Structure formats: structure tokens, C-alpha cells
């Protein structure tokens, strides 16, 4: 049984992940973390409780996963490293995550701004299209719900970085915040008289939660180091 601590457990993503984990036979939730003053603190979750301090539950878990705010990620990585527990962050909007490399010498750490399997395949398709459509204009558009804190999305920034790695080109990102849209990414390649559009639409947060579960099963079997979702996909599907 893999025992999971969820940081940001009452948020949109944390609660979707907890719900799915509690249906799995090989995974369980042994506690959650929320900010000081959150009304859920002290209430039960899975086989444990919601606390404000990861230190108080870290010894009960095999892995900690975070969907919270970027300001807490480094502290959480440090707590996991001290306790020798793997750490996954799905949080986005970080200004600088360099310090996390220090902790990845002691534990496996996975940084995944998007756990969706479709988005991770989109990265590969965008890389291929960029290599082939040399003279085409490229635009990225991302659309998310009104409450999303970071702009542009971590996924749009990753798509932009991939295009830059492949072609050296800086690509504009347009961000739209509207309604309760879970997450949509469009990469548009426009050439003379034609257009190629690569589009990913997440219909529900379960798309990310299912990917996060794959990441949890992956990370508990890894040596210390920094990992990303492509490593998770390679672990499950050789060749992707
Ligand atoms: N990697 C992916 O696939 C993926 C997918 C979707 C979203 N995300 C990212 O995941 C993060 C969370 O997204 P969300 O939509 O779940 O946001 P959310 O609904 O706002 O959830 C964040 C949760 O973290 C809590 N929190 C705030 N400060 C905290 C602290 N110091 N310690 C522990 N918990 C704290 C929040 O509490 P309050 O409500 O009191 O603020 C809230 O319950 C964002 O960065 C988002 O972009 C990633």
C-alpha cells in the first residue's frame, strides 16, 4: 500500500486526487495539509487528518504530493528531503525552483506542471511540428477558469520553451480567463494558405488526477533525482 500525503488537499485538484486515491486498492491518503486558518484543519481525511504542517504527517507517508501555491513548494521539498520521502509538485506559477535541485540529491522529486497524459503527448507533437513547419507563424493560446492564479499557465510556458529549444523562436502566448473552464491549450501553426492546430482540452480535473496517480506509483520506485512527466510516461509506455 502506498501512503500519500496531499498538500492543498481541500483545493480543486487536491480534493479530486484524494477522491480518486481513496478508490484505489494500492494507494491510501494518510493526511493532508492546508494553510493556517483553513476550516478543514483537524478534520479526518483517509486514514489521517488535515494539518497545517507537513512535518507532523511526513513520517506516516511514502510520498507527498502538492497542489497548493508556489510559495510553499521549496519548504515542502526541504521537509521531504529531511524525511527521505519522495516529493511531487503539481503546483504552477513558480518564479524560481532552482533550490529544489539541492533536495533532489537526497530524494526523487517530480515537477509536473501538467499531469494530463494528452498534454504530455502534445509536447511531443508540438516539438515535431515545429521542426517541420519552419516558415510557419506559431501562436499559443491558453484558456482557464477565472480563479486560476498564474498567467500564462505552466503548460503554455512549457510549450513555448519546447518551441524555443527546437527552433530558437520566441512564441507569443495569449491567456484567457473565463468561467469554470478546466484548461485548454491551442498551438497554431499558420503558413501560406493553410493552418495546423494542435489542441488539448481537459474536460475535468480527473484528467490531471489520473496522471498524478501514475506519477505517485512511478516516484516511489525511483532513485534520488529530478524527474518530469516524460519519465513517468516512459516508465509506463516504452517509446513515448
Ligand atoms: N499539474 C497539474 O496537472 C495541475 C492541474 C491543475 C492545477 N494545477 C496547479 O495546482 C495548483 C492548485 O490548483 P487548484 O486549482 O487545486 O487551486 P485551489 O483550488 O486554489 O487549491 C489550492 C489549495 O492549496 C491551499 N493552500 C493555500 N496555502 C497553503 C499552504 N500554505 N499550505 C497548504 N495548502 C495551502 C488552498 O487553500 P485556500 O483555499 O485557503 O487558499 C487550497 O485548498 C495551482 O498552482 C494550479 O495551477 C496543476
Image: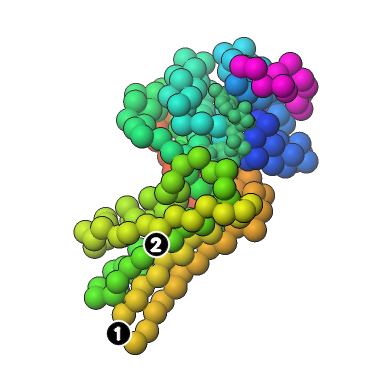
Tag 1 secondary structure: loop
Give the residue drawn at x 60%, y 21%.
Answer: 35
Give the residue drawn at x 36%, y 65%.
Answer: 139
Ligand 1's image quarter is top right
Going from N to C along the chain, the mark reached first, 1 or 2, is: 2
Provide the residue designation for mark 1.
192
Question: Residue 40: x and y, percent?
Answer: 72, 23
- In the displayed structure, 134 sits above or below 38; it is below
Locate the N terminus and report the quarter of the image it occupies.
Answer: top right
Q: Which mark is residue 139?
A: none
Q: CA distance from mark 1 to mark 2?
A: 18 Å
When asked about the image quadrant of residue 39, the answer is top right
Magenta stretch? 36-47
Name the one closer to the observer, 21 or 188: 188
Query: From the viewer's perspective, is 141 left or right of 61?
Result: left
Provide the residue designation for mark 2.
140
- In the displayed structure, 1 sits above or below 215; it is above
Question: Residue 43: x and y, percent?
Answer: 77, 20
Give the residue drawn at x 49%, y 60%.
Answer: 185
Q: Does residue 218 appear in this view?
A: no
- Are the residues tagged 1 and 2 within 8 Å (C-beta)? no
When asked about the image quadrant of residue 5, the answer is top right
Amino acid at each position: 500500500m502506498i501512503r500519500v500525503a496531499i498538500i492543498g488537499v481541500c483545493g480543486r485538484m487536491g480534493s479530486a486526487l484524494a477522491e480518486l486515491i481513496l478508490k484505489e486498492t494500492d494507494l491510501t491518503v494518510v493526511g493532508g495539509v492546508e494553510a493556517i486558518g483553513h476550516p478543514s484543519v483537524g478534520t479526518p481525511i483517509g486514514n489521517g487528518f488535515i494539518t497545517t504542517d507537513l512535518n507532523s504527517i511526513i513520517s506516516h507517508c511514502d510520498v507527498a504530493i502538492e497542489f497548493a501555491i508556489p510559495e510553499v513548494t521549496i519548504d515542502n521539498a526541504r521537509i521531504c528531503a529531511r524525511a527521505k520521502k519522495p516529493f511531487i509538485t503539481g503546483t504552477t506559477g513558480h518564479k524560481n525552483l532552482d533550490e529544489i535541485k539541492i533536495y533532489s540529491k537526497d530524494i526523487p522529486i517530480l515537477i509536473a506542471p501538467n499531469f494530463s497524459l494528452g498534454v504530455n503527448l502534445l509536447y511531443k507533437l508540438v516539438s515535431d511540428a515545429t521542426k517541420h513547419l519552419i516558415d510557419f507563424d506559431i501562436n499559443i493560446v491558453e484558456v482557464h477558469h477565472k480563479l486560476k492564479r498564474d498567467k500564462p499557465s505552466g503548460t503554455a510556458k512549457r510549450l513555448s520553451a519546447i518551441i524555443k529549444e527546437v527552433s530558437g523562436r520566441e512564441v507569443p502566448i495569449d491567456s484567457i480567463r473565463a468561467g469554470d473552464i478546466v484548461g485548454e491549450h491551442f498551438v497554431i501553426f499558420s503558413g501560406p494558405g493553410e493552418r495546423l492546430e494542435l489542441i488539448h482540452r481537459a474536460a475535468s480535473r480527473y484528467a490531471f488526477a489520473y496522471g498524478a496517480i501514475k506519477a505517485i506509483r512511478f516516484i516511489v520506485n525511483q532513485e534520488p533525482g529530478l524527474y518530469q512527466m516524460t519519465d513517468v510516461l516512459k516508465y509506463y509506455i516504452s517509446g513515448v
